[in-house]
Image (cartoon, coloured by chain):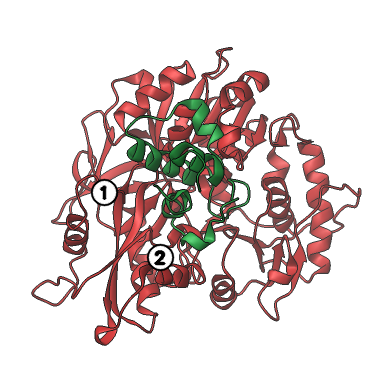
Amino acid sequence: MTDARMLVAEAIERPRDHVPANGTIETVEGWDSLGHMRIMLALEARLGRPMETEEILELASVEAIDRLLNGGSG
Amino acid sequence: MLLSTLPKSGAVQDRPNGPILDVAQLEEAANDRALDLAAGGLKAGQRLAVVPDRPVPLLIDLFAAWQCGALAVLLLPSLPAAEIAAIEQSVRPNLWSLPDPAAAPPGATALPSPGATLRGRRMPVRHNVTLDDPALVLMTSGTTSTPKGVTLSHRALLARLALNVAHIGPETLATSLCPLPLHFGHGLIGNALTPLFAGGHVILWPDAGIAGLSRLGEVIDDAEVRFMSSVPAIWQIALRAARPPRRQSLQRVHVGSAPLSRDQWQAIAAWAGTRHVVNMYGMTEAANWIGGHDLADGDPADGLVGRPWGGALAVRSPDGSIAPVGRGEVLVASPSLMLGYLDQPEMTARSLPGGWLDTGDVGEIDEAGRLRLIGRTKFEINRAGIKIPAEEIDLLLQGHPGIAEACGFAMPDPVFGEAVAAAVVAEGGATIETDGLREWCRARIRPQAVPSRLFVIDRLPRSDRGKVRRDQVAALCLGSLEPGAAP
């Protein structure tokens, strides 16, 4: 199981505690557009496939990323 | 001075579909603000530190400072308190303008950033400034190391704007989109003041974010944008997240502040629907743009930045000879060169030898006068267009009580182009927790300069003469990463 909080935290170069489970691109400091692209690249590396344009826009919360990675199991 | 030269047809708009301020209103707002600044104690020849929140208030502060005959020092937003305090010590502003005056250093005089309300007041006394008076300071490094505040005169700014308009054309600049912040030269001089100087309408959109950039094609279509300039990192997002514009309004696209790969150059042209995609070469010390190579003028090549827009380029060989053609350290002569680094005469003299600007870049100039950049002599990390001196990272980390020595270097990054990395050696065998060390850095330096990656090593490689070999430190650390590992 992949820790979505950790994936986001590593991509935006912050400790895991900086990224709450309900964090979003609008609420997590440092999760800006460039940080978002790093998150997408990390997801592509984890999933072994390119992200679709819609996914790049939709995966803007820890919960959405967790759902993609783990089916929302947290 | 600049404000009085702007054609009345010009206007700034805060975000797509946001409020518009034409040049007459901008002048009114600047006059109004100048009264506030004067009441706050700002006098001719003094320094106003501007910490921007939104781009339009930044422009109002800038023009108002000039109405007062003062020097505007533009600072990064979101500076940690430690850097704000260091700027107070090193730059010694006479007045601060911040979104929240409570964030000003203790004891400093501060005003809140200007609002959008026009009160119709006029500055009763305008201070006459000369063309060679200092107008603007752009900070190109933080204050952990020796601060580098590039000081530009009114003459340098006017020369650069006139050259930009001459090379781009006022028709192309009639409607521009600026997706960059205005606290550095590319956003302020290249993207905002240049269209205004041409009498154009400029949409300021530094906070587009991922959602905004995904609508870039629509925004260009809706506003019939003809010109835009940005950095490769923004195109990384737009090319993946946005559909191309459909109305073929874009006439010219500039890309600068960081290396543009040949593949990305072609991809931008295909997306934008124009071959006029120009790889720009610029330095803050030359008031931003020095020259550029237009894809429409020939095949793209990595590092190809073309001919100068006014002035001259030359290369200096290892034997010290200077030639207009060949390979060596790149020198620039331009009417837009800086006066110098603020309060740093020795650093200024080193950077402006014999009237040339020593760029710190290595390049090759062909017989046609076109420059291709191939390397750097200075130790600088270019993170998505933001330049960070490696020495600044050394000094920052060496200030940590658990670190004996440190060495910053550039690390390849798929989004930023380069990221900040550093090797640290623990003091007396102490244990270093890298996440904690990064947070320690974050409290002391601007966010862009916080190391993305820290490597704890036993000792720094040195030359026979005891000098740290930064290239070997980087090779040692980056070589320790597993193949394909995320930086």
Instruction: Tell whether B263 sits left or right of B188.
Output: left
Q: Is residue B253 visible?
A: no
x 75%, y 34%: residue: B18
Q: Which of the pair A24/B77 is nearer the observer? A: A24
x 29%, y 58%: residue: B378
Instruction: Tell whether B220 sits left or right of B140.
Output: right
Image quarter for residue B263? top left
Q: Is residue B378 above or below residue B23?
A: below
Give the color of chain B as drawn. Answer: red
Identify the mark at residue B348; answer none if there is no mark. Answer: 2
Q: Residue furthest front?
A: A73
Q: Is residue B87 visible?
A: yes
At label 2, which amino acid type do we have? Thr
Give the color of chain A as drawn. Answer: green
Residue identifier under label 1: B485
For the residues tagged 1 and 2, is the chain the same? yes
x 77%, y 66%: residue: B111
The percent position of residue A51, horizontal first and vertical second, equals: 42, 30
